Image: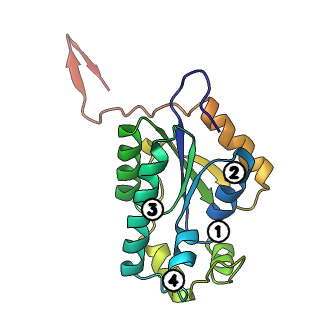
Amino acid sequence: MKPTDGSKPHIIIMVGIPGSGKSFFADQFAATFKSPIVSFNSIRSELFSTPTFSDTEDTVIDQVANYMLGELFKTGRTIIYEGLSNQRNDRTEIARKSRDAGYDPMFVWVQTEPSSAQKRSTKPTDGRPAMTPEQFETRIKQFSPPHISECAVVISGKHTYNSQLKIVLKGIVTPPPKPVFISERPTRTSNRLIR
């Protein structure tokens, strides 16, 4: 997917708990638009025959993903990033790197209730490794939902890809408005208080 009207290319950063449907959407989007994808699941499957989902393993995958991302930034094409985005500080860093490379970051938050997500993430599919219930619980505890300032586009992990795609494409064409934060402290302008 090439940017239109001379606009910046996008990096679509997938956000959600394990098993929410991030990989499903990312894979489908990449196939539809022939977009490059940086997928932690794919890298994990390639590098580790018996994944442990440990911090050490995640560090190695993150290093490979960062290298891939740096190379893909050179293409000027829309990129799908399905990786280390559980915590706000990780998302902030990915967004910063993206902006520095001339990309417009867009967060896509895939929401699915935890019980359905756990069933998905603890069941191996398509060569993707399964987590144990304990690993899933650990990841859930580490997850921080997008803050309002991240202006995430929200899709349901239970909807069809076509329904999800319409919402995401609308977000690309018409990004959500940036939030306006109103100060809690009143300020005085001439003789009036403004809240």
Q: Camera-side residue: 160 or 77?
A: 77
Q: Is residue 20 left or right of residue 51?
A: right
Q: Position of residue 52 (x, y in %)?
A: 48, 86
Query: Mark 1 or mark 4, which has the lower sequence index?
Result: 4
Q: Position of residue 31 (x, y in %)?
A: 72, 53
Query: Mark 4 or mark 3, which has the lower sequence index?
Result: 4
Q: Camera-side residue: 139 or 28?
A: 28
Foreground mark, 2 or 1, reads 2
Mark identifier at residue 65: 3
Q: CA distance from mark 2 to mark 4?
A: 25 Å
Q: Which residue is mark 1?
A: 113
Label 4 element class: loop
Q: CA distance from mark 1 to mark 3?
A: 28 Å
Q: Residue at x 45, y 67 (%)?
A: 143
Q: Is residue 78 left or right of residue 124?
A: left
Foreground mark, 1 or 3, reads 3
Q: Residue at x 29, y 36 (%)?
A: 184
Q: CA distance from mark 3 to mark 2?
A: 18 Å
Q: Camera-side residue: 133 or 105?
A: 105
Foreground mark, 3 or 2, reads 3
Q: Position of residue 14 (x, y in %)?
A: 55, 55
Label 1 element class: loop
Q: CA distance from mark 2 to mark 1?
A: 22 Å
Mark identifier at residue 29: 2
Q: Camera-side residue: 32 or 19?
A: 32
Name the amino acid, label 3: Ala
Q: CA distance from mark 4 to mark 3?
A: 15 Å
